[in-house]
Structures are given as structure tokens and as C-alpha cells.
Image: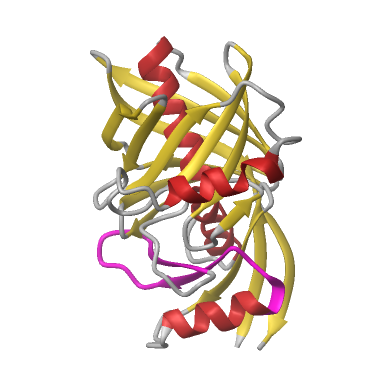
């Protein structure tokens, strides 16, 4: 079986073409991710409502609703394989996602809009769900040197990931303001149960929170694995479009 090892801003995945297959995705996800230590597993499948369907699993075998960096990578994978053209739609568990090839390794996706945007789920901590069913994110500001302090923040962020205030569990995103439209981000991801080098839906959720707080419609999010840009379209204060742009990379192709 051909398995493509990819990453988007350092967030890495094992990817297969599962059209016509009926595998045990959870077991396959754990086995494939163990080869490289990847954060997640993705499979392309047939779809009646989009160009193709995305099955997304975390490295522990748990199924995820969607993944922002993963969606960009699966768009690259499908484009490279000739499954779709430079504009595409992807069926995900969180809803349809649109994708565009920009140039080279850069792709843009339209993330699912927030279905929950609670700025005060806990004191100083916002809660966001993108899509339906929603991808859950906790978002909080940090005033220190975020990346330098990462190791000391791990247990605090792990505790928040399981906090009962977030009934589905949550991906936990701390951010450090660097400028009006620029932040540094650190994410502790559920299903990976540790830090990841980037989180696409986390940056989208953060952009939604900052839009609600400040009205800013553009964000450059520096992740430890790379930079992601998020642009917001809105009408009467309601987010109508959440667009994310960033890199994709094919690292290696395995025969497993």
C-alpha cells in the first residue's frame, strides 16, 4: 500500500488513496502514524457531494471532525494525483471545505465557520467550535515568551484539554501578541496528546476570537512549524468566510 508522508507547516500526516477500499481506518491510522511519528492519518474516498471525501484520524486512532493543515495537505494530495483540479471541494465530518491551489506548495482552504464562539467559557479562555459537528478549541492569551516557556506550560495545557468546561475535550491554543494582526501560537492537540508544530483549525479559531474582540479581519499566525495566514469575511458582525493559506510538503512516499 502506497502511503504518502506529508506536512503542512510542520503538522504531519500519513495519507492514502482509499477509494474502493473498506479498511479499519482506526487501526490503520495507528499503524501508519507509528512509522514516522506523524500527528494524523488521512484517507481520500469517493463522495457524492464533493470532489472527494476526507477521512481524518488522529495518531491514537480516534476520528477527528476535520483538520486545517490536513485539509490543505489532502487538497495537495488530490491535486497531485489528478483527482481534482486547482479548485476543489472536500467532504469532511465537519462539513464541506473548499480548497484552491495558489502556486507551488501553497494552498488555500475555506475553513468551516464557527458554530460556537464563546469568548468567556472560562475566565480568560474562549471556546470555539468550527463546523457542525464542531472542531473544539480553547483559546487563551499568554503574556510571556510563549515558545521559550512551552515545556513549563505543557501540564497546564494538558489539564485544559480535559477540562469539563469543554464537553468534547478541546485543542488548546495559547497565543502571544506580536502586533496588531500578528501572533505567536502554541497548540496542545487532543488525539495527539502533546504539542504539534502547527494547528490550522486552531489558528482559524484564534482569528475568529480576535475578530470578535478587535474587529481585525486578517491574522498572521506564527507556529513553530511555519506561518499560516487567516482572512475573515463577515456581514453585520457575523463571520461568513474563514480562509486560511499556508504551505504543504510531500516528504516521502512509503510502500507499507
Q: Work out whether 138 lies above or below 4.
A: above
Does residue 251 appear left or right of residue 200 in this picture? right
Which portion, as a residue range, is magenta?
A: 35-58
Q: Position of residue 38 (x, y in %)?
A: 64, 67
Q: Position of residue 133 (x, y in %)?
A: 25, 53
| Identity of the residue drawn at 47% across and 85% down | 27
| Identity of the residue drawn at 60% across and 88% down | 1
Answer with the quarter of the image where residue 57 lies.
bottom left
Does residue 92 appear left or right of residue 256 in this picture? left
The answer to whether residue 135 is magenta is: no
Answer with the quarter of the image where residue 14 lies.
bottom right
Q: Position of residue 225 (x, y in %)?
A: 71, 45
| Identity of the residue drawn at 60% across and 79% down | 32
Task: Give the colouring mode of the picture.
Answer: secondary structure
| Identity of the residue drawn at 43% across and 79% down | 26
Q: Position of residue 163 (x, y in %)?
A: 37, 48
In the depicted view, which residue is nearer to us: 143 or 66?
A: 143
The answer to whether residue 46 is magenta is: yes
In the depicted view, which residue is nearer to us: 180 or 248?
A: 180
Q: Work out whether 222 lies above or below 88.
A: above
- Residue 84 seen anywhere in this rendered image of the structure: yes
Does residue 213 appear left or right of residue 181 in this picture? left
**Image quadrant where one finds the C terminus:** bottom right
In the depicted view, which residue is nearer to us: 212 or 230?
A: 212
- Residue 199 seen anywhere in this rendered image of the structure: no
Amino acid at each position: 500500500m502506497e502511503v504518502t508522508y506529508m506536512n503542512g507547516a510542520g503538522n504531519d500526516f500519513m495519507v492514502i488513496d482509499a477509494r474502493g477500499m473498506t479498511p479499519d481506518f482506526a487501526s490503520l491510522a495507528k499503524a501508519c502514524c507509528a512509522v514516522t511519528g506523524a500527528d494524523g492519518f488521512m484517507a481520500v474516498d469517493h463522495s457524492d457531494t464533493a470532489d472527494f471525501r476526507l477521512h481524518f484520524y488522529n495518531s491514537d486512532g480516534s476520528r477527528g471532525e476535520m483538520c486545517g493543515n490536513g485539509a490543505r495537505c489532502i487538497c495537495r494530495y488530490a491535486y497531485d494525483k489528478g483527482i481534482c483540479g486547482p479548485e476543489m471541494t472536500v467532504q469532511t465530518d465537519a462539513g464541506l471545505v473548499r480548497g484552491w491551489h495558489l502556486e507551488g506548495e501553497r494552498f488555500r482552504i475555506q475553513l468551516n465557520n464557527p458554530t460556537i464562539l464563546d469568548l468567556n467559557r472560562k475566565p480568560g479562555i474562549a471556546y470555539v467550535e468550527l463546523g457542525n459537528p464542531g472542531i473544539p478549541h480553547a483559546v487563551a492569551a499568554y503574556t510571556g515568551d510563549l515558545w521559550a516557556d512551552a515545556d513549563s506550560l505543557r501540564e497546564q495545557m494538558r489539564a485544559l484539554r480535559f477540562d469539563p468546561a469543554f464537553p468534547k475535550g478541546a485543542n488548546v491554543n495559547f497565543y502571544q501578541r506580536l502586533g496588531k494582526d500578528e501572533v505567536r501560537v502554541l497548540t496542545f492537540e487532543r488525539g495527539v496528546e502533546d504539542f504539534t508544530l502547527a494547528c490550522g483549525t486552531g489558528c482559524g479559531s484564534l482569528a475568529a476570537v480576535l475578530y470578535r474582540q478587535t474587529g481585525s479581519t486578517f491574522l498572521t499566525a506564527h507556529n513553530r512549524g511555519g506561518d499560516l495566514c487567516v482572512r475573515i469575511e463577515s456581514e453585520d458582525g457575523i463571520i461568513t468566510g474563514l480562509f486560511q493559506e499556508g504551505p504543504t510538503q510531500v516528504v516521502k512516499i512509503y510502500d507499507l
